[in-house]
Image (cartoon, rainbow, N blue to C red):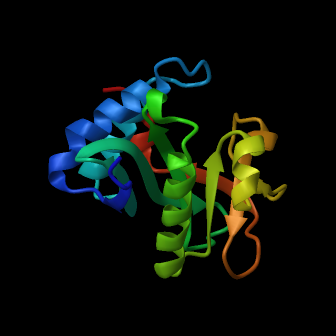
Amino acid sequence: MMPLTLRPETPADSAAIEHVTVAAFKNATHAAHTEQFIINALRRAGMLTVSLVAEDGGTIVGHVAISPVSISSGASGWYGLGPISVLPERQGQSIGARLMNAAMAALKDLGAAGCVLLGDPAFYSRFGFQPQPGLVLPGMPPEYFLALRFHGDWPVGTVTYHDAFNATS
């Protein structure tokens, strides 16, 4: 088996990233099934701060996207993780964990203050993410809105993702 390679996306990867994303979320009951549109809209807007692919033998099997978020208090240097996708037949092989760790390392290298995400606390707590009472994502259950701080004080306020998260096509 070829070793798994993690690398930044290239323009030639967009169709494969879309395929992985659609497949990963196909049977997810919590998903809006617009994740691939979000990634494409973030890319078009120049807002994919970090976009990494997991490649195995020339085939893209996973992807993670990170984009800037704004916080109503004016705190800067915060980013949102997601979507993160792994092909269903490759899930449970630590590909998602490797993508998470690489994405967090990339954010730290950029000097980010922290990262937020909407996801399962049972999975993301292993990476240090936890609910942070002062950070709110309106309309979402607070126990699923998680944050990881790299430096500085915890911000307090309402988090807003880029408009691309409203993309439906």
| Residue 16 appears in the figure | yes
Q: Nearer the viewer, residue 64 or 71?
A: 64
Q: Quick check: 115 above or below 45? A: below
The spot of residue 14 in percent (x, y) is: 23, 43
Q: Quick check: 17 left or right of 142?
A: left
Query: Where 73 falls versus 89 (above or below)?
Result: below
Residue shown at 46%/71% (left/top)?
Answer: 106
Pick out the residue farthest to the left: 12
- How far from the left and from the top, in percent, is residue 80? 54, 55
Res 167 seen here: no
Q: Quadrant of residue 101?
A: bottom right
- Report the residue at 42% width, 45% height from top: 163
Quadrant for the C terminus, please.
top left
Rendered location of residue 122, percent (x, y): 77, 42
Q: Residue 159, position in %: x, y? A: 63, 54
Residue at screen point 45% across, 57% down = 67
Q: Classify 162 as above or below 152.
A: above
